[in-house]
Structures are given as C-alpha cells and as structure tokens.
Image: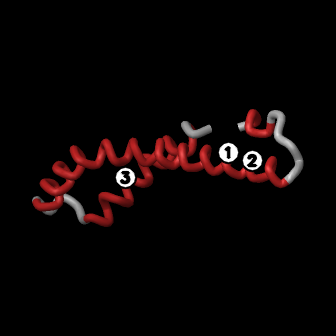
Amino acid sequence: VGLIYLRLRGNQQGVQDRSGALFFVAVNATMAATFGVISAFGPERLVFERERGHGMYSTMAYYASKVLVELPHNIVFPV
C-alpha cells in the first residue's frame, strides 16, 4: 500500500491518482474476499438444505455459527 504514494505530486492530479489507486485496492480486496464465499456457497447449500429439512438446526443457528467460526480466519489472514 505504501507504493501508492511513491512519486505522487501534491497537486489536484496527484490527489486524484491517489484516490483512484486506493479505490482499486479496496475493490480488489473486496472481490477477493467475496470470491471465497461464492465458491463455497454451492456445496454448502446442498448440505444445509438437507440438514435443515431434517430439523437439525434453524437457518439463524446455521448462519450465526458460520459467522462465528469464520470470524478468526477473516480477522487474521487479511493482515
């Protein structure tokens, strides 16, 4: 991220260049995180629907547990 500031001018064009670069980094990070979720959703959906249909747990319990289990991974690995 520090390379974004390498040789940028302090005028209006430099500010716009910096803003564009930061926007690109933010969008790239968001898409990278989203891709992991999208690729895992299909196989998990089939298992979830089968288990929910058998009354093993509710939708809220599934998503709450999924968020809690993936939270440490999402905190540690982006750093």
Do labels 1 and 2 touch, CB within 8 Å? yes
Q: Is residue 33 above or below residue 54?
A: above
Residue 35 is left or right of residue 51, and the answer is: right
Question: Which quadrant, please, contains the N terminus?
Answer: top right
Q: Secondary structure at mark 3?
A: helix
Residue 58 is left or right of residue 64, and the answer is: left
The residue indicated by pointer 2 is 18
Tell which of 30 and 59 is nearer to you: 30
Tell which of 60 and 79 is nearer to you: 79
The residue indicated by pointer 1 is 21
Horizontal and vertical percent for residue 74?
Answer: 51, 45
Label 1: how many residues lie within 10 Å, few (<14), some (14-19) or many (20+)? some
Residue 59 is left or right of residue 17, and the answer is: left
Label 2: how many residues lie within 10 Å, few (<14), some (14-19) or many (20+)? some
Do labels 2 and 3 touch, CB within 8 Å? no
Q: Secondary structure at mark 2?
A: helix
Could you give the CA–CA distance between mark 1 and mark 2, rounded to whole angstroms?
A: 5 Å
- The residue type indicated by label 2 comes to Arg
Mark found first going from the N terminus, 2 or 3: 2
- The residue type indicated by label 3 comes to Lys
Question: Residue at position x 75%, y 33% from top?
Answer: 3
The residue indicated by pointer 3 is 66
Question: Residue at position x 38%, y 60% from top?
Answer: 64
- The residue type indicated by label 1 comes to Ala
Q: Which dot, 2 or 3, sits closer to the camera?
A: 2
